[in-house]
Every structure is written in structure tokens, then in C-alpha cells.
Amino acid sequence: MINSLQLAGFTVLVSVLFAAPAGYVISRSRSRLVTGYSLVLFIVQSLPIVTSVIPLFILFAKIGLVDNLFGVSIVYIGSAMAVSTWMLAGYFDSIPTSLEEAAWLDGCSVLGSFLRVVLRNSLPGVLSAAIFTFLLSWNDFLVALVFLRSDAKLTMPMGLQTFFQQNMTDWGSVMAVSVLMMIPPVLIFAVLNRYFSVGGIGGSLAGQ
């Protein structure tokens, strides 16, 4: 469980940190370069992860990232970045650009308006992307199975798989571990559920 929590936490932190500015660029810019970037993200997300696992394993074996939690987190981040970027771009579209223009008139920079206006009013979108990324890494079995070897590096889905034997299955242990796997996502959603509100900027344009 500690391995899974470390992997999921690091993946969420890095994915959201980079997906937020990437989504902002897609939302606010309409140049050909950004359009091409959006298309690349879509194509990357359309590829099944199984098509890239073996090439990545060969590459990571050469640089010493096999049987390494950091190496697995890189794969998770790459898998989650495209969807997280699209999710945040879609939410940023709902933030009126006039709010940013007002911040610019008050002397705020583009980066400052992004951090203080757009990102602050996009908490539900950021949390949605974070939860999606967390669940992607928390429930993954295929990538962990390919990249992790030692018992000390196993994640929860791999630990669950050890109860399935060729001739018998310890269903009691399977159900117990399944319940344990459900606890962190349920707790996270229960704590953050009150922040999933889209009405926070409803009165920000009053008087226009």
C-alpha cells in the first residue's frame, strides 16, 4: 500500500503541475502550433498502453529504471498527461477571459492572472484531473507487472494477484485486499466532494 500511495501521489503531483499550464495554452491559444499540439495529445491518448509497454521496458532497462518505482511513475505520468490536459483545458474554457483582462489592467502578468484568477477558480477541474490520475495509477496492474520484479516494490494490484493460484484462489484474502484498495479513493472523494462546485464565478461579471 505504501508503494501504491507513493506512486499515485507523485503521479498526481507531477501530472497536474504540468497539465495545468498545458491545458491553459490549449484553452486560450488558437494558433496552428497549439492545434498540432492538441492533435498529438489526442493521438497519444488513443494508443493502447500495451503497445508502448515493451518498447518502454527495453528503454528503461538500458538506463536502470526497471524494478524502480520512479520508472513506473514516469509511465503513469505519460499515460495521464494527455487526458489531464484535455480535462483542464475544457474547464479553463468555462472561465471568462474578461476576468483575466481585468487582472491585466490591474497590473497582473499573464502568469499571475493564470495562477490567481484562472487556476484559483478552476479547483473542481483540477480536482477531477487529480482524481482521474490517482485512480489510473492506483488501479494499474499491467505496467507494474512488466516493470516491477522484487517483492519490496510490489503495488496493491500486484499483491492482490498473488492470491490467485493455478489450482485455487484464496477468495477471503482477495475480498479483504479489495476492500483495502477501495478505502483511499473513497476517502479522497469524501473529503474533496464539497469542492466540486461549478458556480463559484457566477457573480464575477456582474455589472457588465
Image: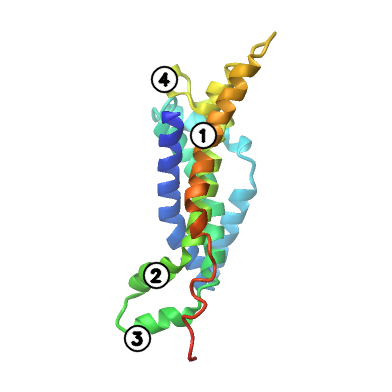
Q: Distance between the residues labelled 2 and 4?
A: 41 Å
**Amino acid type at mark 1:** Leu
Q: Which residue is drawn at 49% across and 87% down?
A: 206
Would you name the residue on which mark 1 appears?
Answer: 56
Q: Which residue is drawn at 60% across and 39% down?
A: 49
Q: Is residue 150 visible?
A: no
Q: Residue at x 59, y 30 (%)?
A: 142
Q: Distance between the residues labelled 3 and 1?
A: 48 Å
Residue at the spot of label 4:
152
Give the CA separation, mark 2 to mark 1. 34 Å
- Element at label 2: helix
Please give the residue where the numbered disc 3 appears in the rendered image.
105
- Residue 114's disc is 2
- The amino acid type of the residue labelled 4 equals Ala
Looking at marks 2 and 4 on the same chain, the residue that comes earlier in the sequence is marked by 2
Image coordinates for residue 54, horizontal then vertical, percent: 57, 30
Mark nearest the camera among 2 and 1 is 2
Q: How many marks?
A: 4
